[in-house]
Image (tube, helix red, strand yellow):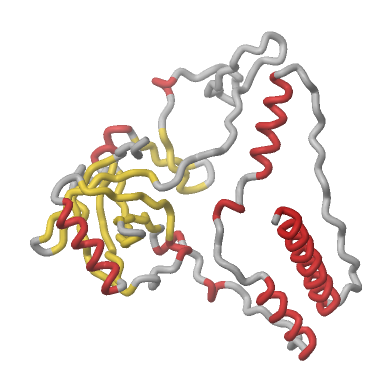
Amino acid sequence: MAAATIWKGVIEFGDVKVPVRFHSAVQDRSIHFNLLHQKDLVRVKQAMVNPNTGQPVPSEQIRRGFEVAPGTYVILSDAELEERQPKESRSIQIERFVPDEQINHQWYERPYYLSPDEHADDYAALVAALRENKLEGVARWVMRKRSYVGSLQASNGHLMMVSLRYADEVIPADSLPRPEGRALDKKELNLAEQLVAALHTDFDPTQYHDEYRERVLKFIEAKAKGHKPKLRVVMPPKPSEDESLAAALAASMSQIRRGAKTVKKKERASA
């Protein structure tokens, strides 16, 4: 099934104009529950309540207020906020091109796939230009009454736009205290290097999934059939306080080697 189009825009820089469609590159897979009344299992409704009287407050009597001091609010109307919203536009302005990977992942907010809306040749040329020159474009655009800054990238023959956080939303690493500790001895350093080498492989995203979500869905499925299974949570053993770093690294290496032997036995058995 083709990915749904969530928005259309035009990438612009200089005299170049490339119409594109936005598609979500991620999806929410969280489990969402309905809140029910215990007695008759009907859905309960949330209501705004005056804490002083305990009475519900009608929506027409609710106002937005920004607290500027304890107990002091600036009241803003819907019309006042709408007047200050960015103007709607289909233009995606590329302000500059920078070396790829220069924008750290901590700036990333949400990725979107871009597909050609028209002029597929211009789209393909832009993909090739970004890929061959190892560049990404810093872009600004307005989508659904919100201003965005993003990184335009070439990814697997397609364009991808990753919306970015603003500077005041990102905490710089130099604001953290510098890590301090003793220097590793030769044995510890050697074991650490062996451990990293043993775990070195290509990234396979299919190996990583939300195990909690899967357990809950399996539990729900079983309860829906009339069963009442119990969730079993296995807690990892706590390491002893006097366990040295070298001992922990050595134990990790032993575990990895045992796992590798098990895999080889299964491969020989299935051969």
Residue 84 vertical position relative to residue 153 in the rendered view, above or below = above
138 up-or-down from 160: above or below: below
Looking at the picture, tell me which residue is in the foreground, 144 or 207.
207
What residue sits 36% from the left and 50% below the top? 112
Q: x and y percent of residue 42 in the render?
A: 62, 12
**How many numbered circles does the render carry?**
0
Farthest residue toward the left? 15
Say whether residue 197 is left or right of residue 191.
left
Q: x, y percentage for residue 177?
A: 62, 76
Would residue 248 be found to the left or right of residue 160 on screen? right
Q: Position of residue 212 (x, y in %)?
A: 68, 42
Q: In which quarter of the view is residue 230 placed?
A: top right
| Residue placed most toward the observer, 4 or 239 | 4
In which quadrant of the rendered image does the N terminus lie?
A: top left
Q: Quadrant of the C terminus?
A: bottom right
Of residue 187 and residue 255, the one placed in the foreground of this image is 255
Locate residue 133 relative to residue 52 in the image: left or right: left
Q: Does 211 sit above or below residue 216? A: below
| Left or right of 176, for residue 117 | left
Instruction: Please tell me which residue is depicted at 26% across the width and 67% down the height of the picture.
Output: 130
Q: Position of residue 7 (x, y in %)?
A: 27, 41
Which residue sits furthest top? 40
Instruction: Say which residue appears at 75% left-offset and 86% top-offset.
Output: 184
Q: Quadrant of residue 121?
A: bottom left
Identity of the residue drawn at 56% across and 51% down: 206
Q: In the displayed image of the protein, which residue is found farthest to the bottom? A: 186
